[in-house]
Amino acid sequence: MTQGNRGTLMLDGQFEVKSERTSVGHRIRDEAEMDLSVIDIVDREIRNAEEADSERIVLDLDELEFLDAAGIRMLLDADARSKGKGRRLQITRAASAQVQRVLDLTGVGEVLSFAA
């Protein structure tokens, strides 16, 4: 059940971030890629949710297809901020084998706090 705060941001028709405020928190969904050209948009959405009174923030990576070093850094920074603020951020795993492989090879998959 949403509370009416929804937004979709697109860049060049390939990148899409959906941000939605729900009754239990905030969901941010990245539906394509997370690289240097778009991490500022994703990070801004996470920071906006952090500043709100949301009990829970979900960064949904289920449809993420590409992740580079800049995206990894942004994920690590957001996770570190969350640890200092009551662990409100929950990151869902990407369904993409390629993205999961990047997380595994870099060791980030063991560091981030993924939602169960």
Image: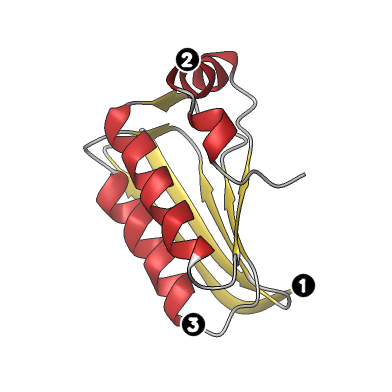
Amino acid type of the residue that numbered disc 2 sits on in the rendered structure: Leu
Q: Which quadrant would residue 22 be assigned to in this image?
A: bottom right
Q: Position of residue 102 (x, y in %)?
A: 46, 18
Amino acid type of the residue that numbered disc 1 sits on in the rendered structure: Met
Q: Nearer the viewer, residue 23 or 14?
A: 23
Q: Residue at x 35, y 56 (%)?
A: 43
Say which element carries label 2: helix
Say which element carries label 1: loop
Q: Position of residue 70 (x, y in %)?
A: 27, 35
Q: Nearer the viewer, residue 86 or 30?
A: 86
Q: Residue at x 77, y 44 (%)?
A: 116
Residue labelled with disc 2: 105
Q: Could you give the CA–CA distance between mark 1 and mark 3, rounded to whole angstroms?
A: 18 Å
Give the left or right position of residue 99, taking residue 69 as reference: right
Amino acid type of the residue that numbered disc 3 sits on in the rendered structure: Ala
Q: Earlier in the sequence, mark 1 or mark 3?
A: 1
Vertical placement of residue 89 versus 12, above or below: below
Q: Is residue 13 visible?
A: no
Residue 52 is marked as 3
Give the left or right position of residue 104, taking residue 45 as reference: right
Label 3, residues with CA under 10 Å away: few <14, some 14-19, many ≥20: few
Q: Could you give the CA–CA distance between mark 1 and mark 2, rounded to whole angstroms?
A: 37 Å
Residue labelled with disc 1: 1
> Nearer the viewer's eye, disc 1 or disc 3?
3
Residue 73 is marked as none
